[in-house]
Amino acid sequence: MENIKIKDMYSLDETIAKDFLEKFDYPWEVLPHIKEYIVELGNSLPSDIYEKRGDDIWIAKSAKVFDSAYIGGPCIIDEEAEIRHCAFIRGSAIVGKRAVVGNSTELKNVILFNKVQVPHYNYVGDSILGFASHMGAGSITSNVKSDKTLVVIKNGEELIETGIKKVGAMLADGVEVGCNSVLNPGTVICKDTNIYPTSCVRGVIPPRSIYKEKGVIASKRG
């Protein structure tokens, strides 16, 4: 299960949640604990940098939050992040430094590393998005199987039991997801990989690759 451990997928210096993530081996193991961690971390944040707004909501004073955005707690919006018009943050969300949460984008139980962009009509639930990853307009994470059974990570012939009902997508650093793509429950996309627009993706996608369609994955040159 190399390439899909937290230490292989993420630059932990690029998130305020570094100490938290270092406690786990695999990213989906983090999901049940995000809510309580945000409350713990939020109460320790320096008041000269972060302002507490409402119940368990901490927003950096340098962040830009549009008046029409909805932010539910617990939530941390880090420095210089931008929460745009009609963004909907349902809670249990960490939005990293200089990240962008855009028009009509919905977040729930997520960690967005620094410089993540989910700028247009995205749904991101029960997911972790690595440093400078980007989801194109209309791309979403599907986080619940249609039969409501526990999510299994499919890594080639290997099946990894998560023991969790809701698991969205784990995007490593530098991942690019094309417009209107669906990342099925338990999708893991490794570092510096590109997903073609309108793709339907499931399982583990290897690092430095280009996902064109099911069964057609090319390695990047160089």
Image (cartoon, rainbow, N blue to C red):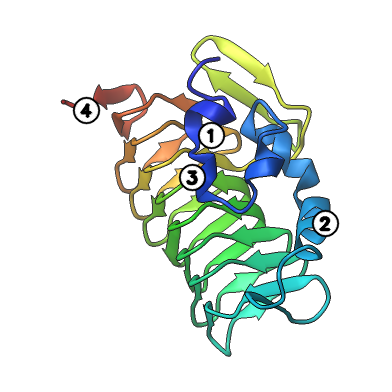
* 139 over 13 or under it: above or below: below
Residue 145 visible (yes or no): no
**Closer to the camera: disc 3 or disc 4?**
3
The quarter of the rendered structure image containing the N terminus is top right
Say which label, 1 or 2, has the lower sequence index.
2
Say which label, 3 or 4, has the lower sequence index.
3
**Residue closer to the observer: 145 or 172:** 172
Which residue matches tag 2? Answer: 40
**Closer to the camera: disc 4 or disc 1?**
4
Residue 161 visible (yes or no): yes
Residue found at x 83% / y 53%: 36
Residue found at x 66% / y 78%: 48
Between marks 1 and 2, how big is the CA–CA gap?
29 Å
Which numbered circle lies on residue 187? 1
Say which label, 2 or 3, has the lower sequence index.
2
Which residue type carries mark 1?
Thr
Between marks 2 and 3, how big is the CA–CA gap?
22 Å
Which residue matches tag 3? Answer: 130
Which residue matches tag 4? Answer: 220
Between marks 1 and 3, how big is the CA–CA gap?
14 Å
Say which label, 4 or 1, has the lower sequence index.
1
Left or right of residue 25, residue 4 in this image: left
**Closer to the camera: disc 1 or disc 2?**
2
